[in-house]
Image: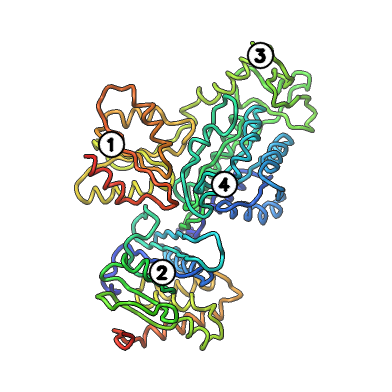
């Protein structure tokens, strides 16, 4: 998937463990889509616990009305845990974009998909002092490499989300944009 | 002209916004997943707007509180799920018996019992019909999108006032937590039904007029009109009676005010091709999978029709007759083990035309996918 051949409808799954901020990431991405005037559905699935357990957020963005609200064949998959990678990678489209956090995803295979493998959690801790920014970094990275929404609306949505954290979240976004621009594919050295 | 910007909103929030826009000024509740966001919204917004929010000790107290508030003149509502709705059943029957307007939202989750608290189901469809002991009809609405959560909650508040009864809004864990951009209408374009206060001399007032005029003035406690309220069978003034003629009149009124106003109550959406030989009957969140299935089928040159009830109770018998009785096959996908399909069979069972009713059930807390609907169609075709 590249920006030039962007299909009309994009299905994104953000997956990992409860507490990694995936529902927030899904919320910001859908807000960006809504601000851009696109049709959006955001759904989520999580267990009864607020920490731990598998958690996912689906965002579908389209020019057309969206009927079925869950992502089934993903155009992009963000997996922040091994479990979520193992479970959801089979449903990533062949030409889909895969973004994984190598702090937690150790076993993965290189295929025809666009793979972006980075230690997002570690980067967040080292550059921003806390792993709390992992979700914003992974999300902004996704936006930059897919162009699913424009940078402008992502920024606006981040600011809308929690104005008191806007400054540090924007910093995380800019860091992710830089990572995306500098990223060398394929990640052969990871094999 | 500048277009109003759509706002990203969750289904539960849309229900709550619809409620306050319809004039709900009293909410009592006990939080329970997946309905909690409604209670949260009300706890934040109602005090700001001069309304009352009460966090109750349980769901029995919640339904009792909203009935009491309604008797005192408030437009009242509560929201719950699963085990909570079971606890409210007695109170719901009481509200119907005393003909006092109120609204109950049931954001359906997997059951029975504690079941799957965070996952969607449509397993309370029949419970919504029979959520009381005794013989009383039900009004229940089931939206399919975030915008409809807003619209149908307003409609539920209006219908409660109009028909003097407890109206249920059904939602589910997926719809309640789903976000979509919505453009809410300006309030001046929203039709709100207000309670009419009596102006006649108090001694002429009958709390339960025996004509079926359901826009009759309704006095509240404290208005200076004397009336009696009891769950016992009662006469026109509300006093207990066992006189067969009075009991019969009361019971018929409860039934007829619904059964004689089907046209006003029932809303159905048609989607796809009316001339199709295969149709889907689906409600709420599952209707979205049906629409997606219809889109896929159309891309392959295959025609399908969806009949979607927005009003689940009273059941849209006439629409089922009109749009489904000539179909070769009717697919009924639902997140339970056959609660809508039993009605379809009841309605179409007497007709001689041969047709196949294909049931698609799922009770695992997951949604039925468009592919599963299409697969059921192919396998049985």
Q: Residues within 10 Å of mark 3 (few under 14, many from 20)?
A: some
Mark 1 or mark 2, whichever is nearer to me: 2
Mark 4 or mark 2, whichever is nearer to me: 2
Q: CA distance from mark 4 to mark 2?
A: 29 Å
Q: Are marks 1 and 4 on the same chain?
A: yes
Question: Badge 2 sits on which subunit?
Answer: A
Q: CA distance from mark 1 to mark 4?
A: 35 Å
Q: Position of residue A61 (x, y in %)?
A: 38, 63
Q: Which mark is residue B274?
A: 1
Q: Are marks 1 and 2 on the same chain?
A: no
**In the rendered image, which residue does mark 4 sit on?**
B81
Q: CA distance from mark 2 to mark 3?
A: 64 Å
Colouring of the image: rainbow
Residue at 30% x, 63% y is A8
Q: Are marks 1 and 3 on the same chain?
A: yes
Mark 1 or mark 4, whichever is nearer to me: 4
Question: Badge 1 sits on which subunit?
Answer: B
Residue at 72% x, 29% y is B219
Whichever of callouts 1 and 4 sits on the residue coming sooner in the sequence is 4
Question: Badge 4 sits on which subunit?
Answer: B
Residue at 26% x, 47% y is B375
Q: Is residue B160 left or right of residue B362?
A: right
Mark 2 or mark 3, whichever is nearer to me: 2
Question: Badge 3 sits on which subunit?
Answer: B
Q: Are marks 3 and 4 on the same chain?
A: yes
Query: Where does the N terminus of chain B fall, quadrant-wise?
Result: bottom left
């Amino acid at each position: 998937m590249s920006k030039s051949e962007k299909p009309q409808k994009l299905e994104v799954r953000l997956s990992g463990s409860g507490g990694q901020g995936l529902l927030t990431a899904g919320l910001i991405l859908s807000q960006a889509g809504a601000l851009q005037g696109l049709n959006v559905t955001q759904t989520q699935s999580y267990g009864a616990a607020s920490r731990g357990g598998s958690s996912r957020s689906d965002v579908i963005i389209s020019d057309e009305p969206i009927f079925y609200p869950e992502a089934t064949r993903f155009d992009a998959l963000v997996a922040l845990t091994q479990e979520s990678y193992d479970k959801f990678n089979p449903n990533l489209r062949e030409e889909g974009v895969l973004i994984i956090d190598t702090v937690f995803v150790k076993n993965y295979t290189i295929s025809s998909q666009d793979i972006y493998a980075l230690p997002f959690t570690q980067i967040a801790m080292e550059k921003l002092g806390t792993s709390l920014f992992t979700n914003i970094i992974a999300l902004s990275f996704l936006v930059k490499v897919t162009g699913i929404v424009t940078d402008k609306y992502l920024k606006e949505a981040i600011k809308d989300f929690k104005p008191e954290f806007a400054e540090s979240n924007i910093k995380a976004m800019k860091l992710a944009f830089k990572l995306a621009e500098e990223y060398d594919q394929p990640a052969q050295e990871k094999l | 002209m500048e277009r109003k910007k759509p706002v990203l909103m969750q289904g539960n929030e849309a229900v709550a916004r619809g409620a306050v826009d319809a004039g709900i000024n009293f909410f009592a509740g006990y939080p329970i997943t997946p309905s909690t966001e409604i209670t949260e919204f009300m706890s934040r917004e109602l005090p700001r707007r001069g309304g009352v929010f009460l966090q109750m000790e349980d769901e029995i107290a919640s339904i009792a509180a909203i009935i009491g508030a309604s008797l005192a003149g408030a437009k009242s509502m509560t929201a719950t799920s699963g085990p909570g709705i079971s606890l409210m059943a007695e109170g719901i029957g009481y509200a119907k018996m005393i003909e006092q307007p109120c609204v109950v939202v049931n954001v359906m989750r997997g059951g029975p019992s504690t079941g799957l608290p965070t996952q969607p189901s449509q397993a309370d469809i029949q419970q919504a019909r029979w959520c009381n002991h005794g013989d009383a009809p039900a009004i229940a609405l089931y939206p399919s999108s975030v915008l409809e959560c807003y619209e149908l909650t307003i409609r539920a508040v209006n219908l409660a006032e109009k028909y003097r009864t407890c109206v249920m809004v059904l939602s589910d864990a997926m719809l309640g937590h789903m976000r979509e951009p919505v453009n809410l209408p300006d309030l001046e374009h929203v039709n709100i039904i207000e309670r009419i206060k009596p102006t006649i001399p108090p001694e002429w007032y009958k709390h339960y007029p025996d004509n079926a005029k359901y826009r009759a003035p309704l006095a509240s406690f404290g208005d200076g009109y004397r009336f009696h309220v009891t769950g016992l069978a009662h006469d026109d003034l509300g006093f207990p009676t066992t006189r067969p003629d009075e009991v019969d009149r009361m019971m018929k009124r409860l039934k007829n005010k619904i059964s004689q106003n089907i046209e006003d109550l029932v809303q159905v959406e048609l989607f796809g091709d009316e001339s199709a030989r295969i149709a889907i009957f689906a409600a709420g969140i599952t209707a979205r999978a049906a629409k997606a299935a219809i889109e896929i089928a159309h891309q392959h040159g295959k025609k399908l029709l969806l009949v979607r009830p927005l009003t689940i109770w009273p059941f849209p018998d006439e629409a089922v007759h009109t749009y489904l009785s000539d179909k070769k096959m009717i697919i009924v996908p639902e997140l339970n083990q056959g609660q809508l399909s039993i009605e379809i069979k009841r309605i179409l069972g007497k007709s001689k035309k041969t047709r196949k009713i294909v049931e698609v059930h799922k009770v695992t807390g997951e949604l039925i996918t468009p592919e599963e609907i299409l697969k059921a169609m192919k396998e049985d075709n």
